[in-house]
Amino acid sequence: MVLMPHMSQSKRKLIGAFLLVGSIVAWSVLGTMIYLALPEGLPPLVLVGYFLIAGMGWVLPAAQIIKWMARPDRQTSNG
């Protein structure tokens, strides 16, 4: 993922923090909307499976954001 390669790590961390919070909020809203759209009377094991997937689904996007945030600054050559 190459987003704004000229950006310093401290700026990436600030932006990444907001991206993480925003993505987790968006994921929880989406998960709630999907849950409310599920038919009533589903077996408990189906619901457990849904909540496991919905509860852990934010991890992969968050991992990519954290990887981008932690990338070291590019070294500039001065001669």
Image (cartoon, rainbow, N blue to C red):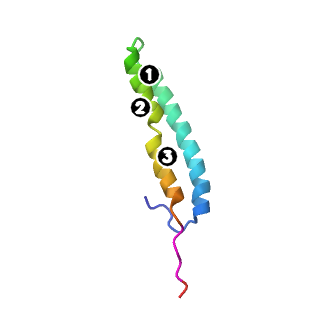
Amino acid at pointer 3: Ala
Between disc 1 and disc 3, whose residue precedes?
Answer: 1
Residue annotated with mark 1: 37
Q: In the image, residue 25 lies at what x, y percent?
A: 56, 37
| Residue 79 tag number | none
Question: CA gap, disc 2 to disc 1?
Answer: 16 Å
- Report the residue at 45% width, 35% height from top: 56
Element under disc 2? helix
Magenta residues, start to end:
73-77
- Report the residue at 38% width, 14% height from top: 43
Up the image or down, 47 lies above or below 55; here it is above
Between disc 2 and disc 3, whose residue precedes?
Answer: 2
Up the image or down, 28 lies above or below 74; here it is above
Question: CA gap, disc 1 to disc 3?
Answer: 25 Å
Q: Depth check: 36 or 47 in front?
A: 47
Up the image or down, 53 lies above or below 37; here it is below
Element under disc 3? helix
- Report the residue at 57% width, 59% height from top: 12
Q: Main secondary structure of the magenta part?
A: loop
Question: CA gap, disc 2 to disc 3?
Answer: 15 Å
Residue annotated with mark 2: 53
Amino acid at pointer 2: Ile
Q: Is residue 63 magenta?
A: no
Element under disc 1? helix
Residue annotated with mark 3: 62
- The quarter of the rendered structure image containing the N terminus is bottom left
- Report the residue at 51% width, 52% height from top: 66
